[in-house]
Image (cartoon, grey):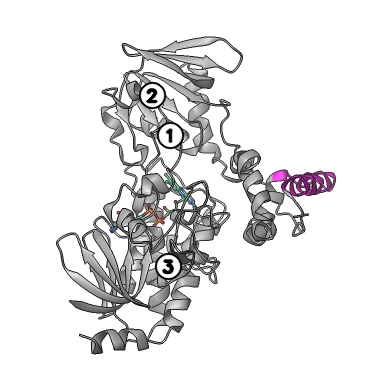
Amino acid sequence: MIEVDAAVIGGGFSGAAVAAQLARRVRPDFALALFEPNELGRGAAYGTRHDEHVLNTRAGMMSLFPDDPGHFVRWVGAGANPQAFISRRIYGAYVNEIARRAFERPRFTLIADRARRVERRGRCEYVVESGVGTRFAARAVVLATGNPPPNGGFLPREIRMHPGYIDDPWRCDYTRIGGHVLVIGSGLTALDVLVALDACGHRGVVHILSRRGRFPNVHADVAPYDVIPALDTRDARALLGSFRLHVRKAAERGFDWRSVIDALRPEAEAIWRRLRPVEQSRFERHLRMHWERHRHRAPQQVDAVRRRYQDAKRLFVYAGAIGEVQRGTVTIALRDGERAEVRPDWIVNCTGMGGAPAMRKDPLVAGMFADGLISAVPGNLGIRTTSDLVALGATNAPTEGLWIVGPPVRGSRFEATAVPELRVMAELVAREIARARPSAFSSLKASR
Ligand SMILES: Cc1cc2nc3c(=O)[nH]c(=O)nc-3n(C[C@H](O)[C@H](O)[C@H](O)COP(=O)(O)OP(=O)(O)OC[C@H]3O[C@@H](n4cnc5c(N)ncnc54)[C@H](O)[C@@H]3O)c2cc1C
């Protein structure tokens, strides 16, 4: 058994950020093991092989450290524009380099393997087992296993069994894709697929289907709003009403709606927590989709690829749902009552990341659910945590010493996917781990 103070499972952005934050805070003899089978710091988002995949957030917002907003722009070097949308590959190199520096510490160890099991031995005592069976005793565990693949369960079996069906659009080799491509979903991932196809020389036709057939809004160069909007959180309807009022008032003073959203972003978590649970559910059902379209915007260069496809009559957009699939032909039931037919060579699932059911596909996470260490939020979006990101177990009690960081906390946190929110989570968890006294770990050693 190898003894460590903390084990971090997953080394995408979230795990890498926790390691970097710990390196700033802990004493020199603090031992960390981070499990990551792939390249450190890249994960689903920044492990893309296409230079054309750019960040959808401006460089000036992408520092790994919340208290040093210029860190990423300085890393890029002379001439870097904080307003630019930089390649995600470059961003992955940044996260990788910063995290690697953390692992220069003598007792920080990178384990190039998956973790396959976490067992609880005592209040703050865990045993983490790697894929090859090495066991690590840890007093703190951070689960940072990231974006679950899209949930395809709701798609007709014939779609999932199609020979050209791609269930994970983030880890796909687009050079092999040609002809007619049916993309299910019209969010940022669908635009990513268009950009990847274009970059790989695709000359065929793309069909994009979603319930409303709408694409994300597009970024614009706007002046920052000079007010932090105070919104009415009595209920979801009042929230929407007060938001619209702010947008109107801002427009009268010449500010774009985008700058109101951006000004709200640091406040969003606090606003969310003030809403009663019943109103949070109402927001999820009726407003979340609209918020996401306005909040997660596409850079202009990405939207330009979509327009190029459309101008060349190589992009067809459908608002509706899959009707039936027969002998390779997909019939789409359109919202206006009409029908359309597509005979795709490839079908890409871009319906966004799956929730708790998709997470359970990883035996590690499934085991943690089965042992009651973690539990799902109502609606199954993600894993339940306290406001300090400590996992809530099956009995509703906090699983002390076990933290969850990143997209798996969707549903517990209002925003849990983008770097400006993830870096705050990473800092919070690292601070808590560094603050905890190692007494539990000492007793773990003594008990063996
Ligand atoms: C395509 C895409 C583009 C994005 N673009 C932006 C953007 O421009 N700006 C922005 O702010 N946000 C963006 N995001 C949001 C993004 O989710 C986060 O920025 C970030 O990728 C989340 O990091 P993560 O480490 O939590 O998850 P992931 O990046 O998914 O990393 C999780 C890691 O855990 C590892 N892992 C999984 N299971 C195990 C296990 N059992 N044992 C060990 N390791 C394991 C995986 O190998 C993986 O490396 C984007 C997301 C996607 C998917």
Q: Position of residue 221 (x, y in %)?
A: 65, 45
Residue matched to label 2:
156
Q: Which mark is residue 212?
A: none
Residue 40 counted in the magenta span: no
Residue matched to label 3:
403
Instruction: Give the dominant element type of the magenta stretch: helix, strand or loop.
Output: helix
The amino acid on which the numbered mark 1 sits, given as a three-letter code, is Cys
Tell which of 445 and 202 is nearer to you.
445
Name which residue lies at 41% across and 42% down. 53
Give the magenta range: 236-257
Q: Callout 3: 10 Å neighbours few (<14), some, many (20+)?
A: many
Q: CA distance from mark 3 to mark 2?
A: 36 Å
Q: Is residue 298 left or right of residue 164?
A: right
The amino acid on which the numbered mark 2 sits, given as a three-letter code, is Pro
Q: Residue lying furthest left in this view?
A: 132
Tell which of 239 and 205 is nearer to you.
239
Residue matched to label 1:
350
Marks 2/1 in contact by CB < 8 Å: the verdict is no
Q: Earlier in the sequence, mark 1 or mark 3?
A: 1
**In the rendered image, which quarter contains the N terminus?**
bottom left
| 301 relative to 8, above or below | above
Residue 256 counted in the magenta span: yes
Q: Could you tell me if residue 299 is visible in this image?
A: yes
Name which residue lies at 50% across and 28% down. 306
Q: Is residue 93 left or right of residue 136?
A: right
Q: Position of residue 105 (x, y in %)?
A: 29, 79
Marks 3/2 in contact by CB < 8 Å: the verdict is no
Quadrant hosting residue 277: bottom right
| 207 relative to 288, above or below | above
Q: Earlier in the sequence, mark 2 or mark 1?
A: 2
